[in-house]
Image: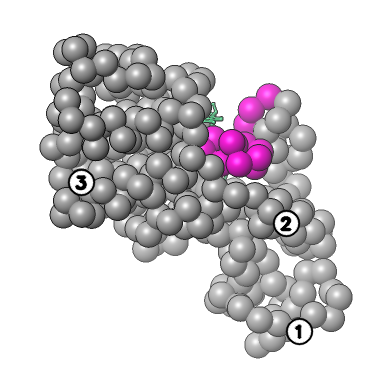
Amino acid sequence: MGSSVIGASIAVNNKLQKDLVKKLRGAGRVVVLTGSGISAESGIPTFREAQSGLWSRYDPQELATPQAFKRNPKLVWEWYAWRREMVSTARPNPGHAALAELESILLLRSKRFTLITQNVDGLHQRAGSRNVVEIHGNLMRTKCAQEGRVITSWQDTGDSPPHCPNCGGFLRPDVVWFGENLSTQTQSDAQEAAQDCDAFFSIGTSSLIEPAASLPYIAQNNNAIVIEINPNRTPLTASADVVFPYLAGEFLPNFVRTTWLNPY
Ligand code: APR
């Protein structure tokens, strides 16, 4: 299906936009996939954007793989400690808030909403989102690198990384590194949601990293309308049914209210 690029304000006399609003209001289940772009307006850098993206300044092979952690656990632990610090001083932006508001609106109408995020920053939950599937883990959570179990407290001996209180192994952030598999639970939750929705939004992701990149196609093959919100083109853009080329934090609040709350 060809995609339509639509202006930011939804004009009620435009047939295309009226049809979209109708479709979205009728959707019994809405699924949203987010990437780092939704947190950009909170001051958290994305990954692949030229100049500002983390991977334009740092080498992921040195920081975000199991091999990197084996080679230099201190460097990896401290890089994540820096990112944790950045996230803890950041605040959710209007884009996160609009998705939390959408969830509340849909729940009140007995409809379903699932937010799948590749982000590890926890900003969706801090904005009030409840049904969140964190497919790449969470930066604020720590696990034992040896046993894999989540560890919530340990003795601060000044070691970097600190040691697991159970086995003495290194602790590491509970995120999914390159070359690692998603947890089977999150993988199947994300897949199930994409298979069984009426509307699928892809917001602020370059749509390059699997398995997230395949989710919109799974949704589309199961007859969902696929909508992309991203100021830049991605591999998904040509296949999306509708594209809004805007910044999520500027676009979403008005879009959610106009689509689900305003009379038309
Ligand atoms: N609103 C919407 N989209 C935005 C905004 C914004 N304010 N700012 C940037 N973007 C878009 C960019 O145009 C780009 O397409 O966000 C996208 C960010 O892409 P990436 O940097 O590749 O980030 P992401 O898609 O989240 O990366 C996926 O790669 O390294 C891994 O694990 C990491 O989860 C991450 C995964």
Rendered-image quadrant of the C terminus: top left
Rendered-image quadrant of the N terminus: top left
- In this rendering, the answer to whether 12 lies above or below 196 is above
- Of labels 1 and 3, earlier in sequence is 3
Q: Is mark 3 within 8 Å of ligand 1?
A: no
Q: Type of residue at label 1?
A: Gln
Front one among 122 and 148: 122
Circle 2 packing at 10 Å, graded few (<14), some (14-19), many (20+), is few
- Of labels 1 and 2, earlier in sequence is 2
Q: Type of residue at label 3?
A: Arg
Q: Which residue is mark 3?
A: 29
Front one among 128 and 262: 262
**Colour setup of the view:** one colour
- Name the quadrant containing residue 156: bottom right
Image quadrant, ligand 1: top right
Q: Type of residue at label 2?
A: Glu
Q: Is residue 238 left or right of 25 when viewed as pictured?
A: right
Secondary element at tag 1 = loop
* Distance (Cα) linking label 1 and label 2: 20 Å
Name the residue located 71 percent from the left edge and 44 percent from the top edge. 61
Q: For the magenta stretch, what is the residue range?
A: 37-50
Q: State yes or no: discs 3 and 2 in contact (Cβ < 8 Å).
A: no
Q: Is residue 129 left or right of 200 when viewed as pictured?
A: right
Secondary element at tag 2 = helix
What is the x, y in percent for residue 54? 70, 38
* Distance (Cα) linking label 3 and label 2: 35 Å
- In this rendering, the answer to whether 39 lies above or below 144 is above
Of badges 1 and 2, nearer the viewer stands 2
Q: Which mark is residue 85?
A: 2
- Of labels 3 and 2, earlier in sequence is 3
Q: Which residue is mark 1?
A: 155
What is the x, y in percent for residue 83? 71, 52
